Image (cartoon, rainbow, N blue to C red):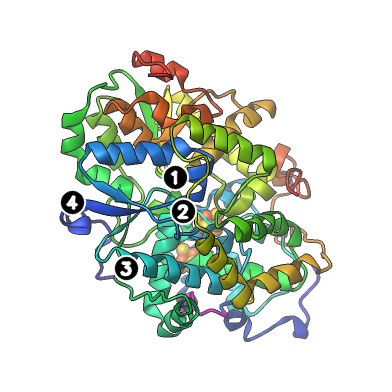
Amino acid sequence: MNIQRVITPRERIGKVPDKLFLFRSCTGSMEYPGTENGIKEVLKILGVEVVMDPDQTCCSGYILTCSGYKPEPALAVTARNLGLVEQRYDGLDVYAFCNGCFGYLSELTHILNQSQSYKDMSNQLVGQWGYHYQGKARIFHVQELYYQLIEKIREKVVHPLTGLRVASHYGCHYLAQQYGILDDGDLPTFHEEIIEALGGTPVFYKERRMCCGYAVGRGFTHKESVVQPHLARKFDSAKEEGVELMTTVCPGCNVALDREQIKLAERGFGPYDIPVIDLGQLIGLALGVPVWKLGFNANTIPVDGILSKLGLGKGD
Amino acid sequence: MPREKDRDWDDNLYSKIDHYNLVENLEQCLQCGKCTGNCPVAAITPSYNPRVIVNDILAGSSVRLLDSEEIWRCFWCANCYRLCPVDIHYPLLMMQLRYMALENGYGLKYVLPINKFTFRALEKGLTFVPGKRGVEKIMRLRTSIGVEPWPQVSEKAIREYRAIFEQTGAKAWMENIQNMTEKPVRFSYLEGRMANEYTKGNNTPGTDRQSAG
Ligand code: SF4
Ligand code: SF4
């Protein structure tokens, strides 16, 4: 094992980009549209230009990993989406804001780049529309950029999160990447450092590394038998530590953690009442992005208590 | 469990399951059990044991693998992969093991409700598009935060996305799965387990899937 597993953002990203390609997340643009919007606003404040493209489709990784179809279409879709970025936005790095998109893009490009026959198969297929994936596009997650820009974020805070007890949920499909991620997959701390930079109080709870349980459709098929007892353990440990707010970096995790709490209470777990928002939305709040642009109406567990603690209202 | 018969052993099981050559180093498995020890699903379903599943695949014993309920519980969280001392990508193995189960008629009920969304994605270019009322809610939400009512996915994108699924045979494969006859799955890894592990609340075998479909 001569490849370093944990590296610094400087080593990983290099120079902070002036401009990046933001990879649209299906869940992020439908379930929690305020996530995508908030991230764009935050990047604007941080001086990074965002490009998106209507010809980009779903990353098509999630249902692949549910065994919903074989790998060929997912590989070809990846070659198409990334070939598109390489051709139209030469040299731009691809930033996902969903751990799913990030993880699947990383895994699928790894397969494409390791296997010439999969790459040829995919390029042949998408070549009919003029796409060609070379394997140059680099894949990042916006959370990595936040961390690289942590000092700039600290300077730009206008609503410090003083006294707010925030717990982070990192999500498996970032931490499970074996090589070259920003932090130790077992004991990551970079979200906590970001929360501190925003003036909040990061809370370490026992099960903070624990999966949201929704990966691969188990929330559809095994909600009661596996997902709910599993999530109850996570929320119990968060509740024990007095967590007031939880952050995610994956709209999919956000669905599981936010939407499931009421159903858990119905089954006699908890009750829990912990609002769950995207880390980008939290940064947005602290950096003074207008609250209405962050779309908290999409949340099942109301965020109002947190807002009033910060002296803000939903309409601000 | 009945003893395996000769015909239940298949020396090529591993290469059949890893049809796509995604987990080339499975034979390096040390049987150390780190995967199982760190698996959140094993913590709730004690008869789910990734180490034993790897062992069965390498040994060529498919008898309890294919009709197993346990294999449908994996979250794909990749904790196992992250901690595996020899970097075995167990989730990619699980994905392919499930293909084999499906093609033999097992576990269809665990994939069809999800595939419903793929068919919809072929119309929209986005996965997990909800029904009509859900769509209206999304449009209201998006409008209220000052962005276009619907995510900007072009007609061209949708057309090409759909064509990829048609031309790779993925759509036909999904339709085929839809038309298969479902065979029942069971908890096939129970032997050697303490009986009372299953008497507590949620772990009772056979109580899953109240919510799917
Ligand atoms: S952690 Fe890896 S080496 Fe150990 S039993 Fe599991 S798959 Fe085998
Ligand atoms: S990916 Fe599956 S087997 Fe591996 S730790 Fe997660 S739930 Fe367990």
Evaluate whether label 1 is on the same chain as label 3. Answer: yes
Q: Are marks 1 and 3 in contact (CB under 8 Å)?
A: no
Residue beneath label 4, please?
Answer: A16
Of B1 and B73, nearer the camera is B73
Circle nearer the viewer, 4 or 3: 3
In the image, which residues are magenta?
B19-26
Verify CB contact (< 8 Å) between mark 1 and mark 2. Answer: yes
Q: In the picture shown, does residue A109 fall above or below A57?
A: below
Amino acid type shown at disc 4: Val
User: Callout 1 environment at 10 Å: few (<14), some (14 to 19), or many (20+)?
Assistant: many
Q: Quadrant of residue B182?
A: bottom right
Q: Where is residue B79 drawn, in percent x and y?
A: 46, 55
Q: Which residue is mark 2?
A: A100
What amino acid type is highlighted by mark number 3? Glu
> Percent from the top left, x then y, of residue B92?
52, 68
Separation of residues labelled 4 and 2 (CA atoms): 23 Å
- Front of the two marks 4 and 2: 4
Residue A116 within the magenta-colored segment of the rendering: no
